[in-house]
Image (tube, grey):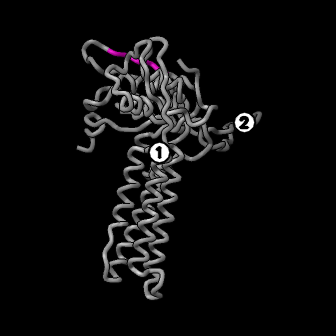
């Protein structure tokens, strides 16, 4: 079975924020050698100069992997990102992640296999850093929740040890989970943070955590939970939405509009976000005069021309 897996299973990776399905992949991992030859002497001395910039030749397939997967928009997002000519992180299905540019790119579709786009392309290394395998959850947005979960568990254990009970830890985890799943406006996050902080103080008073020296560990756990909540709130508020309205001036695919507002590197993720915000029925074509709610670009330097 192991020998057949490459033929029957797709390998997953990504380029920037765009998920990719690999049909096959081939890597040039050769080394450069300095050759020293001498007159009237047979042979040569060769000195290793290090590995050449790797070149990954890949065959990709874009298809609808589920009812909500718009494969054509995903292909457009990949094409935009390739044309942006800015190095992006290629998450290779076998050999790790490295910074790369797209070189050759050939896309084809056929009548025999509708609703799919096949792409042959090369990814060319644009970095001197060592390729690394992904270790999972490293984004700043995700880093707040694990800290809150740890401190909430510590509060639960300390309260149980003192013979009491509380729901403030579970409530804190639920609120931060909701923040990260769908960030609300900054004001709403601040209000929820103030409410949770007030509840933590009330719990400290109810459980006599601040006045009983034997419950110092409980008091410390509550303070650490409040601190982790504030950190989580700050992380989420960095990306909290500021919604504005724009009017489409000429027919355009949604992914192109997303690239113009946020840049090609965010086009794929932002296209899905814009569909959710506006319930767009046909992302392949927005009509002139259509009004969309969009999140303002994080900084003016990243804004492209608007339609």
Q: Identify the element where label 1 is drawn.
A: strand
The overriding secondary structure of the stretch rendered in magenta is strand
Depth check: 71 or 214 in front? Answer: 214
Looking at the image, residue 276 lies above or below residue 98: above
Looking at the image, residue 121 lies above or below residue 38: above
Tell me if 265 is positioned left or right of 111 in this view. Answer: right
Q: Is residue 270 magenta?
A: no
Which contiguous range is marked in magenta?
Answer: 105-109
Q: Identify the element where label 2 is drawn.
A: loop
Q: Tell me if residue 133 can be seen.
A: no
**Quarter of the image that includes the N terminus:** top left
Tell me if 261 is positioned left or right of 173 in this view. Answer: right
Q: Residue at x 37, y 21 (%)?
A: 283
Image quadrant where residue 64 sits: top left
Percent position (x, y) of residue 217? Answer: 45, 81
Q: Which residue is mark 2?
A: 37
Q: Is residue 106 magenta?
A: yes
Looking at the image, residue 284 lies above or below residue 129: above
* Res. 96 mark: 1
Seen as rendered, the residue at the extreme left is 1
């Amino acid at each position: 079975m192991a020998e057949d897996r490459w033929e029957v299973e797709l390998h997953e990776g990504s380029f920037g924020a765009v998920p990719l399905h690999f049909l096959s992949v081939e890597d040039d991992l050769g080394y450069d050698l300095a050759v020293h030859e001498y007159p009237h002497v047979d042979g040569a001395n060769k000195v290793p100069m290090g590995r050449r910039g790797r070149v990954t030749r890949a065959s990709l397939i874009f298809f609808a992997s589920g009812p909500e997967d718009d494969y054509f928009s995903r292909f457009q997002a990949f094409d935009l990102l390739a044309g942006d000519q800015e190095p992006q992180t290629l998450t290779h299905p076998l050999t790790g992640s490295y910074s790369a540019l797209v070189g050759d790119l050939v896309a084809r579709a056929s009548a025999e296999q509708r609703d799919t786009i096949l792409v042959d392309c090369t990814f060319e290394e644009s970095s001197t850093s060592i390729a690394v395998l992904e270790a999972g959850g490293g984004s700043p947005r995700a880093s707040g929740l694990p800290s809150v979960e740890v401190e909430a568990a510590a509060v639960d254990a300390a309260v149980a040890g003192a013979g009491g009970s509380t729901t403030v830890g579970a409530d804190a985890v639920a609120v931060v989970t909701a923040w990260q799943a769908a960030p609300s406006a900054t004001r709403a996050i601040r209000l929820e943070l103030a409410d949770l902080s007030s509840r933590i103080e009330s719990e400290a008073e109810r459980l006599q955590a601040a006045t009983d020296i034997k419950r110092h560990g409980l008091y410390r756990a509550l303070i650490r939970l409040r601190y982790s909540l504030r950190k989580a709130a700050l992380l989420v508020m960095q990306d909290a939405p500021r919604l504005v309205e724009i009017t489409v001036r000429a027919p355009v695919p949604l992914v192109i509009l997303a690239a113009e507002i946020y840049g090609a590197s965010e086009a794929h993720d932002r296209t899905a976000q814009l569909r959710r915000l506006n319930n767009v029925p046909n992302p392949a074509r927005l009509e002139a005069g259509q009004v969309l709610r969009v999140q303002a670009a994080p900084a003016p330097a990243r804004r492209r021309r608007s339609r």
